[in-house]
Amino acid sequence: MVVGLLSLSISSTPLALGYDPTIQVGNTLMWQIETAPSDAFNMFYTGGGDWLAQNETPFTFYISSVSDDVLGQLSIGNVSVQANDTDIAKDLTLGVWGTPTEWWPGLIVRNTQLAIDDLNETAYASAERVAGNYLNGTMESSIDTISLSSGDVTCIVFDYEQDPTGFGEPQRTHLAYSLLTGVLIEANTSYSFGTPYELVFRFVGFVTTTIVDLTADWGGFLTYLGIAGGIFAAVVLLVFWRLSRK
């Protein structure tokens, strides 16, 4: 069932781990939520607790580490939690929990040709109609241009629809990733096992973030206090010396 993509020319120089250079420690990514679930859902895998967000509000991901996965601070609605991108994908349903193949691309993917090919192959495998895969269904991928306020973005787009389940509403997930940066540009994912879940959002851009190093700041502050204390002591001694001369 794997559908191969035409060879793509991805115009960026990836880091050693296959991520775009923009995916580096200290950068913050921001998305705008268009539709959020009306009920709170538990963030079991990230440990963030029950999250609830409003429509037309932003959420951010501050990158704190880049290795085999991307680790960072996710802030969405009432929750702010340090987590890796795979666990975030599971909690927000940004992928397919297939058996035996899971597919959790999440907020950021590697953008090398090899990584994109693997991403595409894994997506189809997660939806395979094989025994035991209750998330079997239809997976389609394509290359498309998505327009943002900042300009047009060439993306690899995935559209998944779970086969009818006999209960609730099957999962439907649309994910589009920039071939330039690997960032999730737009998402629309929904399902219902009794309580409807729907999350729709679009990428806004990279945000300049100032992170305060409390250790460095306190060190500087203590140094300042030491200098100030020394000056104060010198003044006191000078005054005492002058008084004693009188």
Image (cartoon, rainbow, N blue to C red):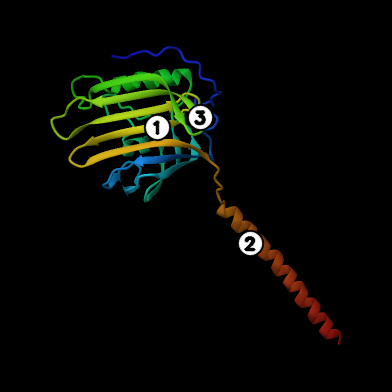
Outermost right residue? 245
| Residue 216 located left or right of residue 93 | right
Pinpoint residue 180: horizontal percent, then vertical percent: 50, 25
Quadrant assignment, res 130: top left
| Residue 171 located left or right of residue 33 | left
Q: Which mark is residue 186?
A: 1
Neighbourhood count class around disc 1 (C-alpha, 10 Å): few under 14, some 14–19, many 20 upward: many
* Viewer-nearest of discs 1 and 3: 3
Pinpoint residue 234: horizontal percent, then vertical percent: 77, 72
Residue pictured at 45% horizontal, 28% vertical: 147
Quadrant assignment, res 105: top left
| Residue 55 located left or right of residue 154 | left
**Upstream in sequence: badge 2 or badge 3:** 3
Residue pictured at 25% horizontal, 21% vertical: 138
Query: Disc 1 to disc 3, how far (Cα)?
Result: 14 Å
Neighbourhood count class around disc 3 (C-alpha, 10 Å): few under 14, some 14–19, many 20 upward: few
The residue lying toward the viewer, choosing from 53 and 104, is 53
Q: Identify the residue under disc 3.
A: 151
Q: Identify the residue under disc 2.
A: 222
Query: Disc 2 to disc 1, how far (Cα)?
Result: 47 Å
Q: Secondary structure at mark 1?
A: strand
Q: Which mark is residue 114?
A: none
The residue lying toward the viewer, choosing from 191 and 146, is 146
Cβ atoms under marks 1 and 3 closer than 8 Å: no
Residue type highlighted by circle 2: Leu
